């Protein structure tokens, strides 16, 4: 258990208690996609796998594998990596999309046994139940991104991620 006074692992700059903790404990539900991206990243860092399962949209491909199998895989991923920080690059809310899809482009900084396995993901979200849920995404190794990653947008990343 991470004390609530410690910095939140989503690297928002806030304390855990005033950032992602209420989401992990089910006291509130992320109401926009960037907030959910942060809460899911912090959940991976902290091993909050029930939260990760509960925020998968019914359309997410992992849902078909069944809860028990997915929880095991989430536990492995949570333990195998070190979560070094999250950078949100671009976001578009559900209101801007005819199908109500919200999109977020972000950099997840992650290390596996000292090796940098950071990636850029263009992720999609839909509202379901009480909040936003993760539908899926396309990702590319951060090392394979040409040029300045900070300049990437949802639009400019589309071709890059289609090629992966
Ligand atoms: Zn947070």
Image: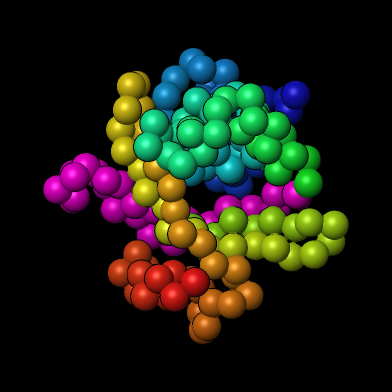
Q: Is residue 156 magenta?
A: no
Residue sitting at x 34%, y 21%: 130
| Residue 79 percent location from the top left of the image | 78, 40
Residue 46 appears in the picture as rendered: no
- Whether 4 is drawn above or below 35: the answer is above
Number of labelled discs? 0
| Residue 11 percent location from the top left of the image | 60, 47
Q: Is residue 93 magenta?
A: yes
Report the magenta residues as a range: 81-104
Residue sitting farthest toward the front = 65
Residue sitting farthest toward the top = 27
| Residue 158 percent location from the top left of the image | 36, 70
- Whether 127 is drawn above or below 142: the answer is above
- Whether 24 is drawn above or below 94: the answer is above
Which of 71/47 is in front? 71
Residue 125 appears in the picture as rendered: yes
| Residue 121 percent location from the top left of the image | 49, 59
**Toward which corner of the image does residue 69 lie, by quadrant?**
top right
Q: Quadrant of the N terminus?
A: top right
Residue sitting farthest toward the right = 113
Residue sitting at x 48%, y 33%: 63
Which of 122/23 is in front? 122
Which of 29/62 is in front? 62
Residue sitting at x 44%, y 75%: 163
Is residue 68 shown left or right of residue 138? right
Residue sitting at x 39%, y 31%: 58
């Amino acid at each position: 258990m991470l004390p609530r006074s410690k910095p939140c692992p989503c690297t928002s700059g806030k304390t855990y208690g005033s950032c992602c903790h209420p989401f992990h404990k089910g006291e509130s539900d992320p109401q926009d996609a960037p907030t959910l991206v942060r809460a899911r990243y912090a959940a991976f860092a902290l091993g909050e796998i029930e939260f990760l399962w509960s925020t998968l949209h019914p359309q997410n491909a992992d849902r078909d594998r069944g809860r028990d199998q997915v929880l095991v895989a989430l536990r492995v991923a949570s333990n195998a990596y070190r979560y070094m920080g999250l950078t949100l690059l671009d976001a578009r809310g559900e209101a801007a999309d005819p199908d109500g899809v919200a999109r977020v482009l972000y950099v997840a900084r992650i290390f596996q046994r000292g090796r940098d396995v950071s990636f850029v993901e263009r992720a999609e979200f839909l509202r379901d139940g009480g909040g936003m849920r993760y539908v899926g995404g396309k990702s590319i190794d951060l090392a394979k991104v040409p040029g300045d990653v900070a300049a990437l947008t949802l639009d400019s990343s589309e071709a890059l991620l289609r090629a992966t």
